[in-house]
Image (cartoon, rainbow, N blue to C red):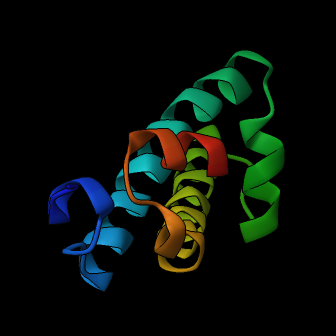
């Protein structure tokens, strides 16, 4: 018989959102590094009225955190283990 930890029955809304934020930060760092190597961060900074690559990176990371939180909130309901989380991503 599966335990609550295996089925995800004990995962709270806050835990799902925090998990999504952590995933958003991890993915944002990797994609932000790639954007930096391609010189795209200054273009992203244009959205907030700047030309600084640092401002573009901060704006990109903000978006990554928000999107990660939304992912944890909505589809995170169906994630019960690492395998199902990988299939949703």
Specify the quadrant that holds the N terminus. bottom left
- Residue 42 is situated, as x and y percent measured from the top left of the image, at 76, 41
Looking at the image, is 46 positioned above or below residue 72? above
User: Considering only vertical position in the picture, is 68 above or below 32?
Assistant: below
Residue at image position (49%, 35%) is 29
Q: Quadrant of residue 35?
A: top right
Residue pictured at 78% horizontal, 51% vertical = 44
Q: Which is nearer the eye, 19 or 42?
A: 19
Q: Residue at x 58, y 45 (%)?
A: 57
Q: Nearer the viewer, residue 71 or 77?
A: 77
Decide if residue 51 is on the left or right side of residue 3.
right
In the rendered image of this protein, does residue 45 appear above or below residue 71? above
Q: Where residue 49 appears, x then y in whole percent? A: 76, 67
State the residue in front, 48 or 76.
Answer: 76
User: Which residue is pictured at 80% across the width and 19% down the height?
Assistant: 38
Residue 57 in view: yes
Q: Quadrant of residue 20?
A: bottom left
> What is the x, y in percent for residue 59?
60, 59
Residue in front for this viewpoint, 79 or 22: 79
Residue 54's x, y, as percent? Answer: 54, 43
């Amino acid at each position: 018989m599966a335990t609550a930890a295996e089925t995800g029955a004990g995962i709270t809304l806050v835990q799902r959102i925090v998990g999504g934020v952590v995933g958003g930060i991890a993915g944002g760092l990797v994609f932000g590094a790639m954007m930096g190597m391609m010189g795209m961060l200054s273009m992203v900074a244009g959205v907030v009225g700047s030309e600084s690559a640092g401002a573009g990176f901060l704006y990109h990371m903000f978006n990554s955190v928000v999107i990660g939180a939304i992912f944890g909130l909505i589809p995170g309901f169906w994630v019960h283990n690492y395998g199902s989380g990988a299939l949703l991503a």
